[in-house]
Image (tube, rainbow, N blue to C red):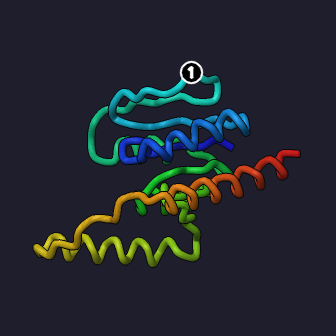
């Protein structure tokens, strides 16, 4: 298993959780972004800088992700693409995208885009809370523990 991070929009506190998990579970974490990122020195953590452009980082993740990998993203279309390749997808709030919920999330996303395009202001998501951080860490631990058990 490799963990891919849609890093341009990933909160710093979530990256820090991922860095600790990479060391603890000895799993590769790759942060993909269109800007240079600072990460701790580790043989389990690396970065991949892509050129700036719409969905360039997303497309790079989709091109590289393999079945069984984990992708950290809030981007619903990216999550749909990686699910189609047999990978797992998790939001920074600890919500796992699944085959059962991805279509409804895509539909809601498209609906909200339509509202915003028509001039209706919907606001953004609330700030990441301590409960969100804990939910992410718990779900990540569950996924990594399952991976370790399967690897044995």
Q: Position of residue 36 (x, y in %)?
A: 36, 27
Q: Is residue 114 above or below residue 46?
A: below
Horizontally, residue 146 falls left or right of residue 71, namely right
How many numbered marks have been drawn onto this rendered protein structure? Answer: 1
Horizontally, residue 88 falls left or right of residue 119, namely right
Image quarter of residue 52? top left
Q: Position of residue 61 (x, y in %)?
A: 48, 44
Horizontally, residue 71 falls left or right of residue 150, namely left
Q: Quick one: SS at disc 1? A: loop
The residue that appears at 46% across and 30% down in the rendered structure is 48
- Label 1 crowd (10 A; few <14 / some 14-19 / many >=20): few
The residue that appears at 58% across and 36% down in the rendered structure is 19
Q: Which residue is mark 1?
A: 41
The residue that appears at 73% across and 39% down in the rendered structure is 25
Q: Position of residue 8 (x, y in %)?
A: 36, 42
Q: Is residue 84 visible?
A: no
Q: Please identify the quadrant where the N terminus is shown.
A: top right
Q: Is residue 144 visible?
A: yes
Q: Position of residue 55 (x, y in %)?
A: 33, 48
Image quarter of residue 108? bottom left
Q: Please identify the quadrant where the C terminus is shown.
A: top right
The residue that appears at 16% across and 72% down in the rendered structure is 121
């Amino acid at each position: 298993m490799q963990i891919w991070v849609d890093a341009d929009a990933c909160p710093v506190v979530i990256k820090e959780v991922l860095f600790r998990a990479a060391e603890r579970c000895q799993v590769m974490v790759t942060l993909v972004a269109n800007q240079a990122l600072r990460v701790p020195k580790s043989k389990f953590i690396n970065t991949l800088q892509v050129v700036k452009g719409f969905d360039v980082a997303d497309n790079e993740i989709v091109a590289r992700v393999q079945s069984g990998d984990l992708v950290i993203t809030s981007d619903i279309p990216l999550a749909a693409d990686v699910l189609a390749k047999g990978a797992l997808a998790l939001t920074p709030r600890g919500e796992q995208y699944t085959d059962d919920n991805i279509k409804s999330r895509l539909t809601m996303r498209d609906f909200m885009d339509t509202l915003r395009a028509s001039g209706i202001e919907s606001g953004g998501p609330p700030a990441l809370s301590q409960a969100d951080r804990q939910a992410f860490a718990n779900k990540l631990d569950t996924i990594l523990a399952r991976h370790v058990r399967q690897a044995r």
